[in-house]
Image (cartoon, rainbow, N blue to C red):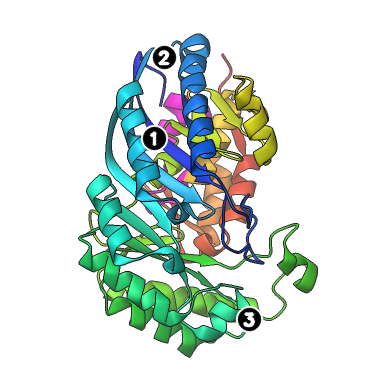
Amino acid sequence: MWIRKKENIGLYIHFPFCLNKCPYCSFYSLPSSFSEKEYFSALTKEFLLIKNFLQTNLNITDFSLITFYAGGGTPSLFSPYFFERLFEFLYKHSDFIPSEVTLEANPETLSLEKLKDYKNLGFNRISLGVQSLSEKGLRFLGRIHNVKTSLKAIKWIQKSGFENYSLDFIFAWKGQGEKTLEKEIKMALKFSPPHFSFYELTIEKNTPFEKKYGSHKTWINEKKLIKLYQIIENILQKNGYTRYEISNYAKPGFECKHNLLYWELKPYIGLGPSAVSRVGLFRWQNPLDLKHYYNSLNKNLLPLKIIEKLDNISLAKEYLFMGLRLKKGISLKYLKEHFKAYISEESIELLIKKGLIEKNKDCVILTFKGKLLHNQVVSFLWDFLDTFKE
């Protein structure tokens, strides 16, 4: 992960526009109209400013963009022509050689023709926000599409030639029982998608759901929640999917390369309001404010909200947090060699006795029970994390 003269970097672009703001969503997005021309101008200015920033502050004069991820918001609101111009710009101003080019999409924004155009431009992966294959679930989650629209979108994705795509679900919504979840999964499995994401519904701060339901899901207890996790894992494993990350399942070879950069602490750049970047020891974030974002770039200034230089203990904590989300877990040897840090043996033994982690040589991984308590396990290990004295 240390900076070399030539660096491999992932590129994320945030598209903060939606047809409708979902009541559970805490990502920065606006249910408003937008100008593709204005957003293209802002993104390209920001990219050139970041190139200069990397050279001036990190001595990176050359880098390759190895993944591209358009997230949101709803990137599929943008026309294929927008992305054609954007890719042309990136090819011209960087070593743009992404092996994975992902577009997040909502079912109601797609058509067969549009998907074919995205495919011809170079997109090779779609992340489809199905969220639920239950009409009741879609209504509760405030989605504006229905199940029929989702099923049609999946068929179009396949027909347009995308071999790599993900179906993204939210589970543990109010009214979802075990049979409903099983039915949703089995309906999706008829398409044999190469990748699934299953995110547990959480009540985020400053969302309509928090205002309506409070800070916790009062409609579901721990026992039922565990059962839902078990249903997802059991059905998908029986059908050839590996849970390579806490919320993500893939057939062999279809793990999301871009997201693995985050989980493995590899360098990435984020463009757009609210986007985060981390390269080497530096991490920065753009403001959660589209107007401020535009105003800064109109003045040829990077719209940075937060910039921090990470020390070894901060990097070690991030490595624990991200690494323990992965099936392969963390390496105590890597922790020592790259961050000059270690975890006490007593804390590891205690978590093993509680059935939360397993240790294989120098690797520590979460058990099924441990994955349910990921944040608590990480917080516990942070308390027993220390660095070697120079």
Q: Is residue 268 left or right of residue 64?
A: right
Question: What is the number of callouts on the image?
Answer: 3
Residue at 42% in and 25% down: 337
Q: Which residue is labeled 3 in the image?
A: 174
Q: Is residue 316 left or right of residue 243?
A: right
For the residues bearing labels 3 and 1, Cβ distance under 8 angstroms: no
- Residue 181: x %, y % from top left: 46, 82
Task: Name the disc covering residue 60, or none.
Answer: 2
User: Does residue 117 lie above or below 5 as drawn?
Assistant: below
Residue at 78% in and 72% down: 212
Local SS, label 1: strand
Sequence-first disc among 2 and 1: 1
Task: Name the disc covering residue 10, or none.
Answer: 1
- Residue 383: x %, y % from top left: 66, 41
Q: What amino acid type is highlighted by mark number 3?
A: Lys
Q: What amino acid type is highlighted by mark number 2?
A: Ile
User: Does residue 78 lie above or below 331 as drawn?
Assistant: below
Q: Is residue 326 magenta?
A: yes
Q: Which residues are magenta?
A: 323-343
Residue at 56% in and 13% down: 390
